[in-house]
Image: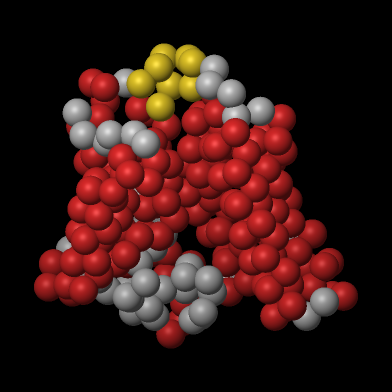
Amino acid sequence: MNSLIAACLLFLGMHWIVSGSPLRGYIVKYVDETLFKVLFSLIIFASLTWMALAFSTAPYIPTWGTAENLKPVSLVLMFISFLLLSMSIFDKNPTLMGLVPPDQVTPRGIVRITRHAGLIGLGLWGLAHFIVNGDWASHLLFGTIAFEGLVAPMNLDRKYRARYGKSWNHFTAQTSYIPFAAIIAGRNTLKLNELNLWGALIGLGLFIASLYYHSTWFGVYPLP
C-alpha cells in the first residue's frame, strides 16, 4: 500500500507543486518550456504506470465493499465521462494543453458546456470507480484521479489567468468550469448542432467497448 500512496503523491505533487505553482517558472528559467513539458509528461506517464502496478499488487482492505446498488449511477457517470473525454479534443480550447491562446477562441460545441471537458470527464471516470469500489487501494487510486479531474480545473484557471490576463477573463466570462453553469447563468447558449458527432460516436464506442471487455481486462463485471 505504501508504494501506491507514494505513486499517487508523485502524480498529485507534479501537478500541484511543480506545474501548478510558481515553482514552474523557476524551473523554466533553467530549462526551456518545451523541455519542461517533455520531462513533465514523462514523469506523469511514469507515475501513472507506477500507480497501476502498485494498485494491482496492493492488499484488499475493505471499507464499504462493492456497492452493487451504486452501479447504475457509476454507469451513467462513465457514459458522461467518455463523451466529455472524446468530445474535448475536437473543439478549439485554450485549456487543451495550452495549444491556442484564449483570444483566438470563440467558445463553441462542448466548450459552451464547460471549458474543462477533458478534466471533468477524467474526474467523473475516477468518481464512477470510487463509489462502487469500497476498499482502500481503490480509494487511493480512483480518488486521486477524481480529485485531479474535478478540482484541478481551478488551479488551471488560476495559472491561465496569470498567463493571459484580460483575454483569459474575457474567455471565462463566456464559459464555465462547472458544466452548464454559463448557459444557466445566461452567459452562453446551448447549441446542440455544434457538438461534434464524431466525438460523440467515439465516446459511445469507448463506453460500449469498456462494458464488453471490462470483465476480461479487469476481472470485474461492471453491470448491475
Residue at 35% across / 60% down in the picture? 85
Residue at 19% across / 28% down in the picture? 224
Instruction: Tell me if residue 84 comes above or below residue 195 in the rendering.
Output: above
Judge left or right: residue 194 versus residue 65.
left
Type of colouring: secondary structure
Residue at 22% across / 41% down in the picture? 76
Q: Is residue 184 visible?
A: no
Question: Which quadrant holds residue 206?
Answer: bottom left
Instruction: Tell me if residue 206 comes above or below residue 125 in the rendering.
Output: below
Q: Nearer the viewer, residue 53 or 143?
A: 53
Residue furthest to the front in view is 216
Question: Which quadrant holds residue 19?
Answer: bottom right
| Picture quarter with the N terminus | top right
Instruction: Tell me if residue 148 comes above or below residue 97 in the rendering.
Output: above
Judge left or right: residue 18 versus residue 129.
right
Q: Nearer the viewer, residue 21 or 164?
A: 21
Q: Position of residue 10 (x, y in %)?
A: 71, 47
Q: Position of residue 145 (x, y in %)?
A: 51, 44
Judge left or right: residue 54 versus residue 131.
right
Q: Position of residue 108 (x, y in %)?
A: 27, 74
Q: Nearer the viewer, residue 79 or 166?
A: 79
Question: Which quadrant holds residue 46?
Answer: bottom right
Q: Position of residue 157 (x, y in %)?
A: 53, 59
Residue furthest to the left in view is 193
